[in-house]
Amino acid sequence: MDLVTVKFLHVLSSTFLFGTGVGTAFYLFFISLTRDARTVAVVARYVVVADWIFTATTVVIQPVTGFYLAQRLYLPLSTPWLYWSIVLFVFAAACWLPVVWLQMRLRDVAVAAVAQGRAELPAQYARLLGAWTALGVPALFSFLAIFYMMVAKRLPFGWGA
């Protein structure tokens, strides 16, 4: 496959991965602060769908295109910035798996609250949102560091200096 095409797919998929992640997190987090069960139920449904369509596919595309590019460019995976990008990607993906489950639970709790005629979300929702946030923040910072390393081709903040 053409190197430029693979680079394009790699950059495009990273944009979808990061953009969808930040966008859906923003909407779910801030709509959750309203505690309005009906509104949260609607938004959470779309967040779950977006995560499956965009994030799940890009979590597969990123390593496939990344390893292909490293191989074609004769770049050892032990190169510090590439090695740490891979480590952080695996870490972020490991955070994402429970985040998806938590998003589905958040959606289900909100939908159940609406079905029960409740206007506000139950306390269980807040606990789930806390766990979701606790996993999402380190994943976000991991992706920010990965973006830096992919652009700068070096470690951030003097790591390894």
Image: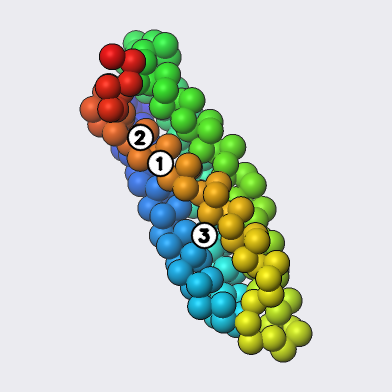
Spatial separation of the CA atoms under disc 1 and disc 3: 21 Å
| Nearer to me, 107 or 64 | 107
Question: Which quadrant would residue 9 be assigned to in this image?
Answer: top left
Name the residue: 64% across, 47% down: 98
> In the rendered structure, are the residues bearing label 2 and label 1 in contact, judged by CB atoms less than 8 Å apart?
yes
Which three-letter amino acid code belongs to the residue tagged 1?
Answer: Phe
Query: How far across and how far down the image is residue 103, in percent?
Result: 61, 59
Name the residue: 43% across, 30% down: 65
Q: Earlier in the sequence, mark 2 or mark 3?
A: 3
Image side of residue 103 versus residue 26, left or right: right
Which three-letter amino acid code belongs to the residue tagged 2?
Answer: Ala
Q: Which mark is residue 50?
A: 3
> Circle 2 is placed at which residue position?
145
Mark 1 element type: helix
> Circle 1 is placed at which residue position?
141
Which three-letter amino acid code belongs to the residue tagged 3?
Answer: Ala
Query: How far across and how far down the image is residue 15, in percent?
Result: 35, 46
Relative height, residue 6 to residue 99 (above, below): above
Spatial separation of the CA atoms under disc 2 and disc 3: 23 Å
Viewer can see residue 153: yes
